[in-house]
Image (tube, grey):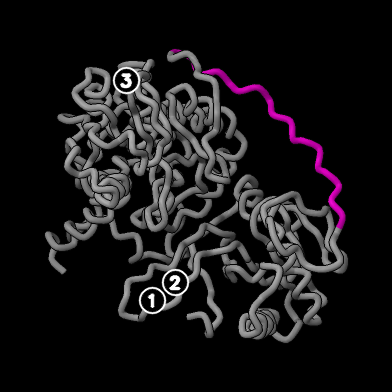
Amino acid sequence: MTGETALRAISRVAHRSGIALLAIWLAGAVPGGFAPHAQAAETVNPDVVDRTTLRVCADPGNLPYSNDKGEGFENRIAEIIAEELGVPIAYTWFPQTIGFVRRTLGEKRCDLIIGVAATNELMQNTNPYYKSTYVMVYRADTDLTGSLGDPVLQGKKIGVQPRTPVASLLARHCLMGHMKSYPLVVDTRLEKPARQMVADVSSGEIDVALGWGPLAGYWVREIDPTLKMIPVVPEAGTRLSFLMSMGIRYNEPDWKHTLNRILRKRKDDITAVLTAYNVPMLDRKGQLIEVAAQPRDKPASPAPREKPAAASIAEPDGYRMEAYRAPVPRTLTGARTVDAETLIDLIKTEDIALIDVFPAARKPEGRGNDQLWREPKRATIKGALWLANMGVGKLHEDEEAAFKAELSRLSEGGKRTLAFFCEPDCWMSWNAAKRAMSYGFDKVVWFPGGVSEWNDAGELLEETRPWRPSAQE
């Protein structure tokens, strides 16, 4: 593959994601670029991180993320990291255009990129520290629902960046004839299309802007706080929300662990910064987090949040058959119920098979092998196998047989411990662990906190695709 062909391929990935920051993915597309997979094993090289200074790779003029005056939210987050490490910050400035990663992180001129999509492969990712989505920006005299199928949008002039997920939805709803196009991948020193979209809504040049949340929210705050902003309603087959993490070089596990611990410890402070910059954030269930706006000059720390007392839920005699996302019992008779800290200790002392049973969409019936089907992806506990949908209340006969056989393989005939998890308030993990015991497996662990609690503990996640019973493939 030529450098030009590879560049076009990576560009398409950036366009599909639609996140302005993902222009940095382009950096590894040309020959001689930053190619982490050439050194994929973490034991190849020791960490090369400068422990006396926090060396940050950043764009000198890319608000709201960063600038050379320290005015961006990534500048503020870098200050939190440096404060926790007890070291000063030194920036390596480079525009977030083609060559950014290669000329900064790749050349070891700096050690950390504060904001990258958690799915990017040019860098090793920390655990995610916020999740955002595409939004609609519109004037207060318009009433919108967030759905691109809303009849109110007919006849409205809509600003959008082409080859983004929201642009695809415009085409699906036959709204392309009302579109005003703004460039996607730009030189941030010269163009700020998100700012221009918001300004054009304010002036009446367009009626609605569809943009990436952190960019749109900031420019609404700066240009016209009277504008309204609402998440675009997602539709099947189109991803609109993305987890954001920090980017580091591969082969630096100690540095990653350090950053994950800081992200966990200073989570509330980082959230306060994002809130102050009007960044729309989603919770674990994909719902918009409602927060009060903070003053521009001094982000305030949010009030301490108290965990509600856990309700006492009785264990049913059989399996949970519906409403799987609901409060779960505190125990599972016959299994060891553990929290993240206990599971971490168990992994060190026992041979454990980690099994995620979070549900995943199945390939539609009747879709042939020659028709496009992309298996979903999920960030789960590192080393876990994703046995999707195996925690439903009743399995098909062929699924049950395949699940039982797979558990036998994973347990090595009952020698290894089987640890089941999902997400908080997820009955599927409870069902799956109970089902495993009904098969005769006696070394069963249930981790009700799931991936979210593991992530909050600062532990490693990795992206994976679901295992499927052979009869379902």
Disc number at residue 69?
A: 3
Seen at 65% across and 22% down, the residue is: 303
- Element at badge 3? loop
Q: Is residue 148 visible?
A: yes
Seen at 19% across and 38% down, the residue is: 179
Q: CA distance from mark 2 to mark 3?
A: 52 Å
In the image, 332 versus 57, the foreground residue is: 332
Disc number at residue 367?
A: 1
Q: Would you name the residue on which mark 2 appears?
A: 364
Q: Are marks 1 and 2 in contact (CB under 8 Å)?
A: yes
Q: Which residues are magenta?
A: 297-314
In the image, 158 versus 434, the foreground residue is: 158
Residue at the far front: name it: 151
Three-letter amino acid code of the residue under disc 1: Arg
Q: Which numbered disc, 1 or 3, marks the residue that appears first in the sequence?
A: 3
Q: Which numbered disc, 2 or 3, marks the residue that appears first in the sequence?
A: 3
Q: Nearer the viewer, mark 2 or mark 3?
A: 2
Three-letter amino acid code of the residue under disc 2: Pro
Q: Position of residue 266 (x, y in %)?
A: 58, 33
> Quadrant of the rendered structure where residue 418 is?
bottom right
In the image, residue 324 sits, relative to residue 224, either above or below, namely below
